[in-house]
Image (tube, rainbow, N blue to C red):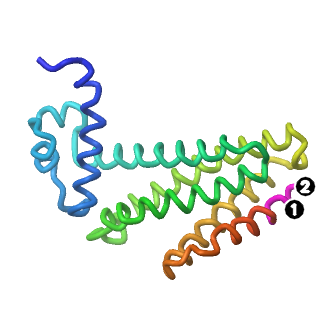
Amino acid sequence: MSSNTEQDQLPQQILETASGLYLKYGLKKVTMDDISKAIGKSRTTIYYYYKNREEVFQAVLDNLIKEVIAEIGMRMTEQQSFERKISAFCLAKVKTSEERASFFRAIEAGMDAEERSKHINEAHNRMMEAEKNLLLKVFSEGIDANEISKLPIDEQKSIIFILQSGIRGIRREMGLKNNFENLHQIVNTLTSMVIKHSR
């Protein structure tokens, strides 16, 4: 009989194993059988926690989003001022995206347009929403500390959307050239644009 702690850790172990398999073989080629063999548990055990491949994959994505948001949030809370928090968001966003780029390439491999739209776009939308909530909190703190003007919520959301889109575009362009040399300088410019508009 396995201990409670081992049972508590099993769902997380399943997700970590599935992530590793996706990275190695791509999403389409990984079966519940593969996961159970890799983890050394019966398929019945896997099915106890996740009823099918789709559920495992969704849980892996949930996990990934939580990890990324926790890391970005931690980088932001390490900073004191509104400006530094915005800059920390941008730098952490680029870092976390680059670190997970190979995972996303692996899961996209072999997906058709419909599957890509369903899985990747959904993950993207959830990530955007979670980031927006982090940034709204920072705007609220900035307003309370009189660092920025009391902007209407719609205007805050517009600035946040431009910031999110901007940093994603910057990461993509720099990634294509595989040159992140000027990242800090570009992030400083993007941050000061946000500051100027928010004062």
Q: Tag 1, which secondary structure?
A: helix
Write the residue at 35% across / 61% down: 103
Q: Is residue 94 left or right of residue 141?
A: left
Image coordinates of residue 1 in percent, x first then y, are: 11, 17
Q: Position of residue 40 (x, y in %)?
A: 10, 39
Tell me where the magenta segment starts and ends, as one range: 193-199
Separation of disc 1 and disc 2 at Cα? 6 Å
Residue type of the residue flagged with mark 1: Lys
Say what amino acid the circle numbered 2 marks: Arg
Q: Residue at x 66, y 41 (%)?
A: 77
Q: Are marks 1 and 2 in contact (CB under 8 Å)?
A: yes
Q: Quadrant of residue 22?
A: bottom left
Query: Which corner quadrant of the image does residue 59 belong to?
Result: top left
The numbered disc on residue 196 is 1
Residue 195 colored magenta? yes
Q: Secondary structure at mark 2?
A: loop
Q: Position of residue 89 (x, y in %)?
A: 64, 54
Q: Residue at x 35, y 68 (%)?
A: 105
Residue 60 image offset from top left, x and y in percent: 34, 47
176 part of magenta stretch: no
Residue 120, placed above or below residue 57:
below
Q: Residue at x 78, y 41 (%)?
A: 140
In the rendering, which numbered label is found on residue 199?
2
